Image (tube, rainbow, N blue to C red):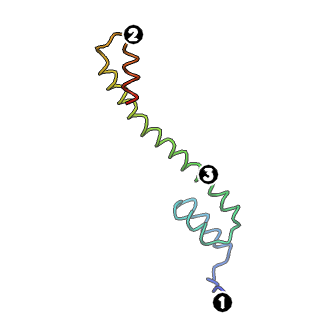
Amino acid sequence: MAQKDSGVSEDMKTLVTILLLIFVFPIGFIVMWAWPRWKTWVKLLVSLPTILIFLFALFIFLAVVAAPSTQIKRAECTKNCATYSEVQKPACITECMSE
């Protein structure tokens, strides 16, 4: 069965999609993949910066989330090993960090 034409030209779909991408990005992104008949490589090219930004933000988020716990653990170990001599302190901290 033939698909019913919505009555909207491809030029109008392209214009609406571009405006949505600029002004209402998340919705424009979804519309870009669903509505106009753009070639897949064009959609991928438009999507690539978004994917890269998302992956970069995810990497930064994970780095920030992981780093404080390590620093807190190091501070606790340093506090617990304060009574050791300066020669023994690094070994104590290393052992504490590995637990």
Query: Image quadrant of residue 84?
Result: top left
Kindly identify the amino acid type of the residue bearing the numbered disc 3: Pro
Q: Position of residue 7 (x, y in %)?
A: 63, 83
Work out whether mark 1 precedes mark 3 in sequence or the reverse, and give the earlier one. Answer: 1
- Mark 2 and mark 3 residues within 8 Å of each other at the beta carbon: no
Q: How many marks?
A: 3
Residue at horizontal 55%, vertical 45%? 56
Marks 1/3: CA–CA distance: 38 Å
Label 1: how many residues lie within 10 Å, few (<14), some (14-19) or many (20+)? few
Work out whether mark 2 precedes mark 1 in sequence or the reverse, and give the earlier one. Answer: 1
Disc marking residue 66 = none
Residue at horizontal 59%, vertical 71%? 34
Residue 66 lies, with reference to residue 21, above or below; the image says above
Marks 2/1: CA–CA distance: 83 Å
In which quadrant of the rendered image does the N terminus lie? bottom right
Residue 76 lies, with reference to residue 20, above or below; the image says above
Judging depth in this view, the residue of 49 and 85 nearest the camera is: 85
Judging by the rendered image, the residue that carries numbered circle 2 is 87
Residue at horizontal 58%, vertical 53%? 51
Kindly identify the amino acid type of the residue bearing the numbered disc 2: Val
Judging by the rendered image, the residue that carries numbered circle 3 is 49
Judging by the rendered image, the residue that carries numbered circle 1 is 1
In which quadrant of the rendered image does the C terminus lie? top left
Marks 2/3: CA–CA distance: 51 Å
Asked which secondary structure carries label 3, the reply is helix
Judging depth in this view, the residue of 55 and 19 nearest the camera is: 55
Kindly identify the amino acid type of the residue bearing the numbered disc 1: Met
Q: Position of residue 28 (x, y in %)?
A: 56, 64
